[in-house]
Amino acid sequence: MHRRSQGSQALVPFDPEIEAAARRRSREARRKRQAEVSMAEDQRVLRDYALPQASRTTSSIVSPAVKANNFKLSPALISFVEQEQFAGHPSKNPNAHLRKFLAKCDTMKINGASSNAIRLRLFPFSLKDRASDWLQNEELNSFTTWNMLSKAFLSKYFPRGKTAKMRAEITSFIQRDEESLYEA
């Protein structure tokens, strides 16, 4: 006959706090599972790095915090800004686009939202085609103020070379014999 006390099986010691011990074991098992899952997420295959990650896309514009609880841009306002979009063509004037954009932004006032916050949130809607691509391809989180964004926009679409060329045209203009000063 084979008795337990003499056998090879060890008995589990008596635990007066069995419920606490069960909770502790359950908690340890849950932590172990979570650690395994996080390790599996960190070990992505090479193909995963080549695929675009929508969750990791961010903007080049950092929108400042707004103190208003119910702040949102209305679809009508976005549509109003989208009526005159800048596409980045060399024949279009970026200064005129900024003037019109600022005039539209200055027509509205939202309590708790600075003009800087409104302008930064609306500006991407005023661009299309190449200009929109330019903004999306800028370094992430590179524009934190309207001043920074407008300077970068003007340096891209109204470079110094273009300014120098226009100055040269103005200073070297010639009035022909048959035209008035107004026509010249």
Image: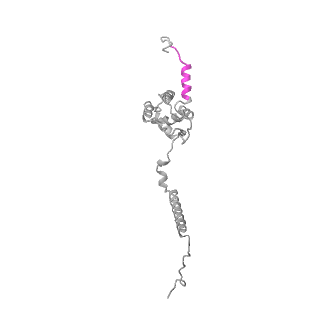
Seen in the picture, residue 51 relative to 135 is either above or below; the reply is below
Chain part drawn in magenta: 161-175
Q: How many dots with numbers?
A: 0
Q: Main secondary structure of the magenta part?
A: helix
Please give the name of the residue rendered at 55% of the width and 29% of the height, measured from the top-left corner.
161
Q: Can you tell which quarter of the image residue 16 is in?
A: bottom right
Residue 71, position in %: x, y? 49, 38
Foreground of the two, 23 or 32: 23
**Relative to 4, does residue 27 appear above or below in the rendering?**
above
Residue 60 in percent (x, y) is at 53, 40
> In the orientation shown, which residue stands out farthest toward the front?
16
Is residue 173 highlighted in magenta?
A: yes
Name of the residue lying farthest toward the bottom: 1
Task: Reply above or below: 117 against 169.
Answer: below
Q: How is the image coloured?
A: one colour
Residue closer to the observer: 89 or 118: 118
- Residue 66 horizontal/vertical position (percent): 53, 38
Closest to the observer: 68 or 152? 68
The image shows residue 47 at horizontal and vertical percentages of: 47, 54
Q: Is residue 69 shown in magenta? A: no
The answer to which quarter of the image holds residue 147 is top right
Residue toward you, 41 or 139 = 41
